[in-house]
Amino acid sequence: MRKPVAPSTLSQAKTLVEKIFEPAFFHAIITLRSSSDTFIGYTVLAQPQVTKNRDAKYSVALLPEYQGHGYGTEVTRFIVDWGFRMGGLHRVWLGVFATNVGAIKVYEKCGFKKHGQWRKEHWVNGEWVDGVLMAIVDEDWEKEQAALEQK
């Protein structure tokens, strides 16, 4: 049985953020804006490893029942925009399972480009899964935003 990628409750997410992601450059718990503030996932923009390079690793995890509804695209655009405009980043990069076709489409929709593939990077459910490296740089993000504004 596959373990969930994301915590499944708001309290689990808060604990995860406090213990693991507190030193992150930017982190957030994602909830639906409603009377219940339903927890649906979390996102993290990691602290740059080498400050002069101004790059940060991006992560997002949504509960399965909230995938495919545009939330991943919305939060990815928000975090990447924040990273470039407010965080002064030059590059935002991420790693994703090659089998996670839906996530790869979201990242490409947000302007990320594939930069490489790690063969047999992750051991998942008894088999090796390749990892895909994707990234976007600030000038490409600006072009993407200008194109969206013209539509």
Image: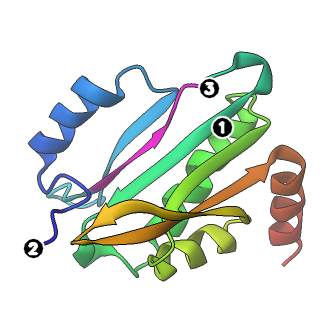
Residue 11 at what x, y percent from top left? 10, 41
Badge 3: residue crowd in 10 Å (few <14, some 14–19, many ≥20): some
- State the CA–CA distance, disc 1 to disc 2: 36 Å
Q: Nearer the viewer, residue 27 or 91?
A: 91
Residue, disc 1: 83
Q: Amino acid at mark 1?
A: Gly
Single out the mark in the foreground, 1 or 2.
2
Q: Amino acid at mark 3?
A: Pro
Q: Amino acid at mark 2?
A: Met
- State the CA–CA distance, disc 3 to disc 1: 11 Å
Earlier sequence position, callout 3 versus callout 1: 3
Badge 2: residue crowd in 10 Å (few <14, some 14–19, many ≥20): few
Residue drawn at x 63%, y 58% is: 133
Q: Nearer the viewer, residue 65 or 59?
A: 59
Q: Magenta residues, as a range?
A: 41-48
Residue drawn at x 67%, y 72% is: 108
Pointer 1 with pointer 2, Cβ within 8 A: no
Q: Is residue 27 left or right of residue 151?
A: left
Residue, disc 3: 48
Q: Is residue 119 left or right of residue 139?
A: left
Residue 128 at what x, y percent from top left? 37, 69
Residue 9 at what x, y percent from top left? 11, 52
The disc placed on residue 1 is 2
